[in-house]
Image: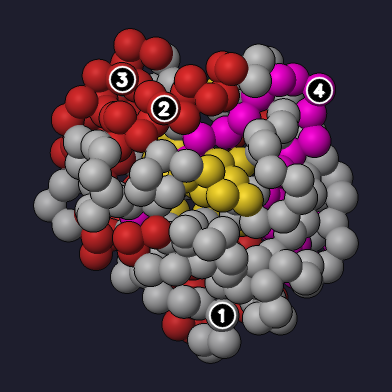
Amino acid sequence: MRRRSPAAVVCAGAILLAGCAGAAGERLGADGQGQSPTRAVSDVRGPDRDDRDGRDVLPPVVDHIRTRDRVVFLTYDDGAERDPGFVGLVRERRLPVSMFLTDSVVGPGYGHFARLRAVGASIQNHTLDHPALRGLPYAGQRAEICGQQHKLRSRFGIRPRLFRPPYGAYDTTTLRAAAGCGIRAVVLWRASLGPDGALTYTRGEPGLRPGDVISVPSGETASLTLTERTERLLREIEGRGLRVGRLENYL
């Protein structure tokens, strides 16, 4: 049974493909000032369009989900890192991870993500070409988001409901474009896993807490493999009495 839970709004910044969530944990939001939210959103649910007047309903922006369940959410960015051992880890641990894919980064590697999807991972949208969307015109932002929706539908037969803007950079135009492309929530992160396996936080006190969204960026320069970094992270999660939840069930 799908659980629903209020979404907290946040915005903040990050760095490039080697760390889409950013080693410093900084994100650029709608006003370009780090952690100031664009709007206060609580309990935002419902269809992509307002039935009363046909206007797009802007999706909520979340980095943490209020829940009494002792869960956190593992999300992986870009698709540059294709560690074969990671498929086995997801299968063996039955990890409900979310993969936010960029077409130009994944390149010919969609087969790897088909295998991940077969063992329980979900596939979500991270644009076609990984641009910083904030400030771009509506048509350009829509092309990036809808273009990847079409790409993922042709590859996997799915229409993702979740979207992560590259570098965490977005504005109201991004939200309008995302809504028009069928996106139900824009997903940022409160915690980010660095190449060395250490967590950094975008806001609040350090330390994982129930409902946190964790970003694991691509780590081409990391000394640890994706599997090794994830195993370290799982030890920290479990050491705090938490488990990995399926993000889609809470949004």
Q: What residue type is labelled 3?
A: Leu
Looking at the rendering, which quadrant does residue 3 occupy?
top right
Q: Distance between the residues labelled 1 and 4?
A: 33 Å
SS label for mark 4 = loop
Residue 16 at x, y percent in the picture: 38, 68
Chain-order first, disc 2 or disc 4 = 4
Q: How far apart are marks 3 and 1 (CA)?
A: 35 Å
- Rendered residue at 81%/22% (across/down): 68
Judging by the rendered image, the residue that carries numbered circle 1 is 134
Asked if residue 92 lies in the magenta stretch, the reply is no
Q: Specify whether residue 150 is in view.
A: no
Q: Which of 221 and 173 is in front in this view?
A: 221
Judging by the rendered image, the residue that carries numbered circle 4 is 68
Chain-order first, disc 1 or disc 4 = 4
Dot in front, 2 or 4: 2
Looking at the rendering, which quadrant does residue 66 occupy?
top right
Q: What residue type is labelled 1?
A: Arg
Q: Count the marks: how many?
A: 4
Label 1 Cα neighbours within 10 Å, binned few <14 / some 14-19 / many ≥20: many
Q: In this view, does 78 lie above or below 88?
A: below
SS label for mark 2 = helix
Residue 93 at x, y percent in the picture: 39, 13
- Rendered residue at 12%/52% (across/down): 108
SS label for mark 1 = loop
Q: What stretch is highlighted in magenta?
A: 51-78
Q: On the rendered structure, is 98 left or right of 6?
A: left
Q: In this view, does 147 lie above or below 149?
A: below
- Label at residue 232: 2
